Structure formats: C-alpha cells, structure tokens
Image: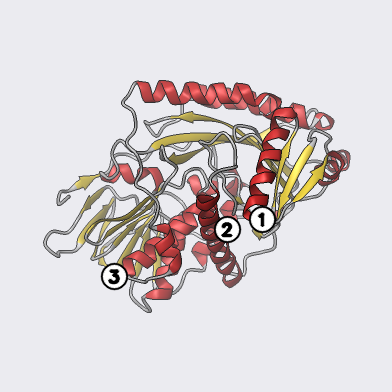
Amino acid sequence: MNQCLSTKALPADPGPSAWREILEPGPSFAPLQADIDADWVVVGAGFAGLAAAWRLSQLVNDERIVVLEAGRVAEGPAGRNSGFMIDLPHELNSTSYAGATEKDARDIRLHRAAIDFAATMAAECQLPSGVFDRCGKVTAACAARGEQHLVDYEKHLQAMGETYETLSAQDLKEYTGIDFYTRGLFTPHAAMVQPAAFIQGVAAGLAPSVTLYECSPVTAFEPGRQGARHSLTTPQGMVRTPRVILAVNGLIQRFGYFPGRLLHVFTYASMTRALAPDEIERLGGQPNWGIIPADPMGTTVRRTSDLRGSGHRLVVRNHGTLNQSYEASSANMRRAAKLQDQAFKNRFPMLSGVEFEYRWGGRLCLSLNSVPAFGELEPGVFSACCQNGLGTVKGTLAGMMAAELATGTDSELLQSYQTFDAPKKLPPEPFLGWGANATMRWREYKAGIEL
C-alpha cells in the first residue's frame, strides 16, 4: 500500500468484561512510553495475538517481540466470549453444524491443533484448575426442530468417523440440574476456558523475549517503503520493526485492509450474581457445565463455580446484530437483555429472583464465506484476523499460522490453512445491513424455544 494508515478511535465495548470482573486483580502491563525498535510487533493481545507471540518466541530464539494491546488485557473481545474451544464444525452464519465432509475434516484437524497449542500454553503457564478444561462439548435441543438438527449432526459425525455419545433428557437433567433439554450430543475433544483468566495467565507467562504493553492502541501505522522499517505510533510512543502481525480481528479494516469484505457482528451475554447455597441446592446438577444450542441461533448457557472465589454463576448468551460501525447501540443491549431474561426464566424456574449482575456485548468478525482474513498483506505485514465467531480456537489457530508464515516455517498445518479462499466481497449498503439483520431476526424467530 505504501501509504500512511491512521486508525480511528477505538470502538467502545458495551458493558463490563464480566469474566474479568469476577477475577481477583490480575497482572498489569505498562503502556508504551518511548520510541523503541523491535524485531517483531504483534498488534493485539487476544487469543490470536498471544498465540502469535508465543509461537514466534518458539521459532525466533531471542529476537525481541513486542505486543501492543489497545486496552487492558482481557477487557476486550477476548475476555467477553463464552469460552468454548470447539474442535468440530461450528459456524455462526450457518443454518446447522453439518457441512461438507472434506472441508470439515480439514477444519477439525486445524481446530484440534489449536486446542493442543492452547493446552500447552495453559500447562506451561501453570494456570489454575478450571481455567482450561478439556472436558468435551454438549450440544442440546429442547424441541423437535433442535432434535432434528442433532439427528442430522449425528449422521454427519458418523460419516466422518467421529466419536460422540447421545444424551437423553435424564442425562441432561443430571448434568445441568434442569429438565429443559430433551436430547443432547456429547463430543469429547473440545475444551472450555474461563476466557479472561486464560488470557491473563498466558499474557503473564510469555517468554522473556516478549514485552507486552497494554493501553497502547496503534493510532498510526506506516508500512515501510523500499525495505525501511514499519512504524507503529501509540499515544505515548512508537515502535519501528521489520515485521508486523496484525491480530486485531475485525479492526484489521481500520488499518486499511480487506475493505468491503468483513462483517462486524455483536453477540450479547448476561451473568448472574453468585448463587446462594440454597439456590445451588435447588439447581442441582454439575458445578461446571456448558450447553451449546442445537440451533445455531439458540441460547448458549454456562455454569461456572468458585474460580478464584467468584462463586457459582450462570451465563446466558444469545442474540446477534450486524453493526458495521463497530458500535452496539443501547437498543441492541435492551433487546438482548429482554431475550436473555426470558431464556433464563424458561430454563431455570427454580431460580426465580436470581438477578443478572453483568450484561455485556462482544465484537465478532465474520466473512461471507466463513474464511479467515489471513496472509502477508504487503512485505513484512501479516494478518491473523476474522475468526468467524469462534475466537478462542480460530484466533489461536490464526496466530500460530501467522507466526509460521512470517518466519518462513513450513508445516502441514500451514499448508492446510492456506487452502482457504479469500473473503468474498459484501453486498453494498443499505442492503447489507437490512438483509443481515432481517435474516438474523428471522432465524431467531424460527429457533423458537431454543432461543
């Protein structure tokens, strides 16, 4: 591009980062306050950025790696997701989880490699029990439409030779404590994380060759010309470097790349206050569990217990909106709160009177054809962006692969990852906004009680 690219003001994330709020104070990192040189710069300290920095530190020995995080670690989108690291096909813009066998087999290999990498980071950082749990995944239905989704999914898993277990309504009641779900499907290779605790722990455990600066948004980015170093300006400093990995998900467009090709979607969630002992007894079930809805537009539910003294809490996530402005409105939040209140009431009638303590929204990035925004964009500038609604695992994967591509490391995983097509061009506005939001509302309506 050979031009100076200036980023705009950072978008505001609606509501608190609840997963971070319930933790004890974590590590803090100073902002960049000087002009420095580095061998590598990674922009973004979410799942993609930390995986990129971690993988780089394995590949380039003692070269100096700088990570620039715009806000505070784990307060942005990385700390706002539901915490499922899913190995199997899972696309938010699909009507079911059953896809093309060959493509899905590729995705499964890649996703499991990313989960293995996350497990290694968790082990080397000695993260506490419950921060990373390779416990598998339960997908559940509560009505005929969702049950049919599961039947189709089972057939698809059979065709791929994947292991699974069918769960009855009684199995699901013993698991969750509620009798809302009628049929389920357990698959064993996924993991669940406390996303903010995972991000904090990995950030604190980076190699000595990696320096992380938080509260250091890139306000201007000037790619180097004719072999010159790239310059990244922050409010109080600057970094000059020959190689940059942009791990900023949808904000890659703020740097001037992939114009007209990325969808900016918000999803919304609510977390209860800590449950009282009598409420925990009334609920029953397991102390830690998660349910993925059989209908992709349904409600995701998690129960988490006693991580760093946070108590037993329930999390409900549903609703999605297209916000190409990167900003969710107060009306979006009110609509989400209404839907989540009803979803909680439907599922937990024994917990009448339990209030939500936190409500928030989280930014996602999708492409029309569900592919990453990946590759070398110009000499020495690499993208690890567009996670298509599965930032934990696809972000980790993108960061790993960007580090390998940038260092010239050949691997079967990288070769497979590079078989993705480029993101397709989007329809023009206002048709894009109208069409996408109308489609999501229609699919939420069709999800029925699954929502």
Residue nearest the viewer, comparing 245 with 417: 417
**Residue 137, visible in the rendered structure:** yes
Q: Quadrant for residue 269, please give it.
A: top right
Name the front one of labels 1 and 3: 1
The residue at the point 64 percent across, 51 percent down is 159
Label disc, if present, on residue 39 of the rendered structure: 3
Tell me which numbered mark, 2 or 3, is placed earlier along the sequence: 3
The residue at the point 34 percent across, 50 percent down is 217
Instruction: Give the total number of marks visible in the rendering.
Output: 3
Distance from the alpha carbon under mark 1 to that under mark 2: 28 Å
The residue at the point 60 percent across, 51 percent down is 88
**Residue 242 placed where, x, y %?**
23, 66
Q: Amino acid type of disc 1? A: Glu
Determine contact: label 1, label 2, CB under 8 Å: no
Label disc, if present, on residue 124 of the rendered structure: none
User: How crowded is the residue under tag 1: few (<14 C-alpha within 10 Å), some, or many (20+)?
Assistant: few
Provide the residue designation for mark 2: 198
Q: Amino acid type of disc 3? A: Asp
Q: What element carries label 3?
A: loop
Direction from residue 5 to residue 351 in the image, left or right = right
Distance from the alpha carbon under mark 1 to that under mark 3: 43 Å
